[in-house]
Each structure stands twice: as structure tokens, then as C-alpha cells.
Image (cartoon, rainbow, N blue to C red):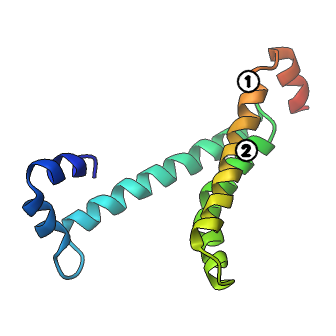
Amino acid sequence: MFFIHHIAKTVPDALDRMENVAGPNLFDAESIIVAASFSIGWILWCVSLLRARVFSWLGPALVLLGLLGAPVLGAVGAALGLSPVLGMAAAGVLFSLGWMVLGRQLLKAPAALSADRD
């Protein structure tokens, strides 16, 4: 997954042979493993932030909504006759807002963070 650019530049025929195979192959499995690991890592990180109650629930919840909402909002956009990219962009906005909320909370003094938990 991480060497696609290098393979495409150095041996483009090999990349064509990897992608033009009928049915599932190791190239597809590798992509699924990377995407699943990435998603599970983000979900677990957000859940751990929510459970630790160090930050307000809003930041991690927005990050989770953006991550999990991308395919849902893309499908809803497509069902409404819009480009799926618009729905996925809306999820990206939620994801970014979550990061902004978390960043803003990091700028607060430690005493203010403990007051937010209560």
C-alpha cells in the first residue's frame, strides 16, 4: 500500500498485473488490512479519550462522527442525487472540527481541564 508510487514509477507493468486480476487478491487484502487498522486505531483512540474524561466529550465525538460518517454521508449524498464527495467533505469538516476542539482544549491550563471534567 505504501509502495504503490514507487512501483508505479519503477515497474508500471507489475502494478498493472497486480491490479488487473479477477477477484480478490493479495493487493486487495493489503489495502483492506491497512484501511481497517487505520480506522480501528482512530476509533479506539477516540473511545479512550471519551473514557478517560480528560477532555470534553465534544472533540473526540466529532472526530468519531467524521470518521464513521464519511461513508454514510457519501451514500446519503449519492442517494439524494448529489456527488458523494459532498457528503464525504461534510464528514471531513466534522473530523476537522473535532481536532480543533481538542487543540483548543490543549491550550487551556491544566486546572481548567480538570474543571471541564466535572
Percent coordinates x, y for residue 115 in the rendering: 91, 24
Mark 1: amino acid = Leu
Q: Is residue 15 above or below residue 55?
A: below
Give the residue displayed 58% in from the left and 51% down from the top: 43
SS for tag 2?
helix
Where does the image place residue 31, in percent across and percent down from the top left? 32, 60
Mark 2–mark 1 distance (CA, rounded to whole Å): 14 Å
107 is higher (above) or lower (below) than 19 = above
Q: Where residue 60 is drawn, which disc sits there?
A: none
Up-down relation of residue 84 to residue 41 (above or below): below
What amino acid does circle 2 point to? Leu
Element at label 1: helix
Residue shown at 22% from the left, 81% from the top: 23
Taking the spot 45% from the left edge, 50% from the top edge, the residue there is 38
Q: Residues within 10 Å of mark 1 (few under 14, many from 20)?
A: few
Q: Quadrant of residue 15?
A: bottom left
Residue that numbered label 2 is attached to = 97
Q: In the image shown, does 92 or 116 lie closer to the viewer?
A: 92
Q: Left or right: where does residue 116 sit relative to residue 19?
A: right
Look at discs 2 and 1 and give the one toward the viewer.
Answer: 2
Mark yes or no: residue 52 visible: no
Q: Is residue 96 or residue 64 the one in the foreground?
A: 96
Q: Left or right: where does residue 12 sit relative to residue 103?
A: left
Q: Quick one: label 2 or label 1, which is nearer the N terminus?
A: 2
Residue at the image point whose x is 20% and y is 65% from the top: 26
| Residue 69 on image: x %, y % | 65, 63
Q: Quadrant of residue 12?
A: bottom left
Q: Which mark is residue 106?
A: 1
